[in-house]
Image (spheres, rainbow, N blue to C red):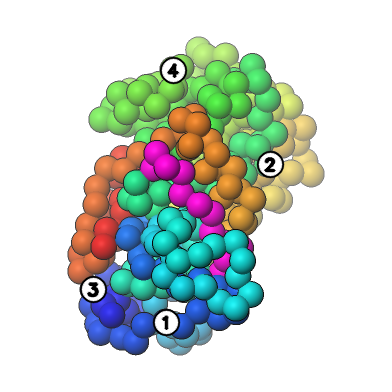
Amino acid sequence: MKAIIRQAYGPADVLGLADVDEPVPGDDEVLLRVRAAGVDPGVWHVLTGLPYLMRLGTGLRGPRTPWLGTDVAGEVRAVGAGVTAYKPGDRVFGTCGAAYAEYARARADRLAPIPANLSYEQAAAVPTSGMTALRALRDAGRVRRGQRVLVIGAGGGVGTFAVQLAKAFGAHVTGVCGGAKAELVRSIGADDVVDYTREDFADGDRPRYDLILDAAGLRPLSHLRRALTPRGTFVIVGGEGGGRWLAGLDRQLRAALLGPFTRQRPRVVFAFPREADLRTLAELAGDGRIAPVVSGTYPLERVPEAIRELEKGHARGKLVITL
């Protein structure tokens, strides 16, 4: 089968298309014919080996595995001896360890059925970004009906899900994005949109927010706190800065350290795979309360190009690999 592999950490240039053996599912796994795979910042971190702390789990001097790609959607081709939830022919989505390939094996408890109204491309856009937004709002943010919610990075992968989920939970939602994405953010349900190139959401002219979800990763924590109610919650998703050792983790660590010293509630979120969350997202998508935003698709051999586009930081919603 064809698969994208790499032998070293580095930029997208280290990736190549190769012929490799088809995987064999274990007892608790299924074999998928991959139809689509998502592209998200986590892929870039695994590709580059940044932050360095991550290499304690992925390999110190080089990657322990040549594979890449986490979010997957496809058709079940075979199941392990211990799998009873799925059978060949089922359409499923979720996470695995090698999604950028024609076939992939995935743990059955990290998958969920694809709703009938979603394509494979749409389903592949959901897992990591959707679970991150869901946990940020529901678990960390404890969002409630009638609250004022600010989503920073509202036009991106996590942000487009966060806007829709916050509306589904009954909140009044303001999205922060660049002007080019403003109409998109309105179209997915935002009650108000702030163009960060023209306005400052924390300038004091707007009512304060009960909950802020920051998926853009650029602003100081003090800036977020100025826009928050005295006992409001701000949730940090991803981030910039921190150098090679803490790349993407700097603000999360500072938010965690700040917690004991303020009445406001700083929270951080990491999207570890969980079947229950996938099924919740599938139900919401099946009911039409959320709809994945896919702005671009790429064939398998163009995975490096998709990752380079992701690095630019301007993608609307999600980028997806199609097979």
Label 3, residues with CA under 10 Å away: few <14, some 14-19, many ≥20: few
Mark 4 vs mark 2: in front: 2
Label 2, residues with CA under 10 Å away: few <14, some 14-19, many ≥20: few
User: In the rendered image, which residue does mark 3 sit on?
Assistant: 13
The local secondary structure at tag 1 comes to loop
Q: CA distance from mark 4 to mark 3?
A: 40 Å
User: Can residue 101 be seen by looking at this rendering?
Assistant: yes
Residue at coordinates 37% horizontally, 56% vertically from top-left? Answer: 38
Determine whether label 1 and label 2 are within 8 Å by CB.
no
Residue at coordinates 71% horizontally, 51% vertically from top-left? Answer: 257
Q: CA distance from mark 1 to mark 4?
A: 48 Å
Question: Quadrant of residue 56 in the image?
Answer: bottom right
Numbered mark located on residue 23 in the image: 1
Residue at coordinates 26% horizontally, 62% vertically from top-left? Answer: 323
Say which label, 4 or 2, has the lower sequence index.
2
The local secondary structure at tag 2 comes to helix
Q: CA distance from mark 4 to mark 2?
A: 24 Å
User: In the rendered image, which residue does mark 4 sit on?
Assistant: 192
Determine whether label 1 and label 4 are within 8 Å by CB.
no
Residue 127, compared with residue 222, is above or below; it is below
Q: For the magenta stretch, what is the residue range?
A: 107-118
User: In the rendered image, which residue does mark 2 sit on?
Assistant: 139
